[in-house]
Amino acid sequence: MYAVIKTGGKQYRVKPDDVLEIERLPGEAGDILEFDQVLMLSGDAGFEIGTPVISGAIVAAELVEQTRGDKIKIFKKKRRKHYRRTMGHRQDLSQIRITEILTGGAKPSKKAAAKKKAPAKSEAKAEKTARAEQPAPTVSEAAAEPKAPAKKAPAKKAPAKKAAPKKAAAKKAPAKKTAAKTGKQD
């Protein structure tokens, strides 16, 4: 059995135990959601199409978690006009698990949600009672506990001085030519 539901301006084909990411719906994890905009039902007896919705049909789902989608980058540009714009968007989403597809005006059962919520509450209560049962340390007990020695921060080294740049060797002037080399004779 499957159904086509409408939520968040979109249509989804769902069947029991499907997990979907849809547009954000109000609520917390573990809440039961009811989708009454059922556009089509398909089952053992065939299928039924609503005009626009099927009256008395409900799809029940459990809210698994509230998430956000991937970031989408939007970039606009007009060439040779020095116009560029960059924007981003992340859609808020709800992850849901389809529990039941109901017809004939039946209401969803809350057994599945109650089972999942009960352990979470009992764990939180157990933590609170465990903290409450432990007595707070007194001042004398806190002072009696040995403290770990504080670690010393490594000493900072003084910055190394840069070596003075070497001076370039001065160029020697070319030697004057003597008369013997020039070919003068007496």
Image (tube, rainbow, N blue to C red):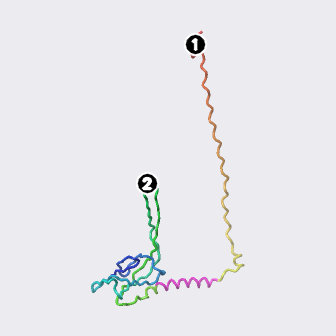
Q: Tell whether position 54 is magenta.
A: no
Secondary structure type for disc 1:
loop
Place of residue 91 in the rendered image (x, y in percent of width and height, measured from the top left): 45, 72
Residue at 67 percent of width and 80 percent of height: 137
* Above or below: residue 180 compared with residue 59: above
Give the camera-side residue of 92 and 169: 92
* Above or below: residue 169 compared with residue 186: below
Residue 105 found in image quarter: bottom left
The answer to whether 170 appears left or right of 37 in the picture is right
Give the camera-side residue of 167 and 124: 167
- Viewer-nearest of discs 2 and 1: 2
* Above or below: residue 76 compared with residue 140: above
Residue at 61 percent of width and 30 percent of height: 171
Give the camera-side residue of 4 and 95: 4
Residue at 62 percent of width and 84 percent of height: 132
Q: Tell whether position 127 is magenta.
A: yes
The crowding category of the residue bearing disc 2, from other C-alpha atoms within 10 Å (few below 14, some 14 to 19, many at least 20), is few
Number of marks in the rendered image: 2
The numbered disc on residue 184 is: 1
User: Which secondary structure type mostly characterizes the magenta part of the structure?
Assistant: helix
Residue at 37 percent of width and 83 percent of height: 37
Secondary structure type for disc 2:
loop
Furthest-left residue in this view? 46
Q: CA distance from mark 2 to mark 1?
A: 76 Å
Q: Which residue is mark 2?
A: 80
Place of residue 72 in the rendered image (x, y in percent of width and height, measured from the top left): 44, 66
Q: Residue flagged by tag 2: what amino acid is it?
A: Arg
State the extent of the magenta-drawn residues as a range.
116-134
Label pair 2/1, CB-CB below 8 angstroms: no
Place of residue 149 in the rendered image (x, y in percent of width and height, measured from the top left): 68, 67
Q: Residue flagged by tag 1: what amino acid is it?
A: Lys
The answer to whether 29 appears left or right of 106 in the picture is right
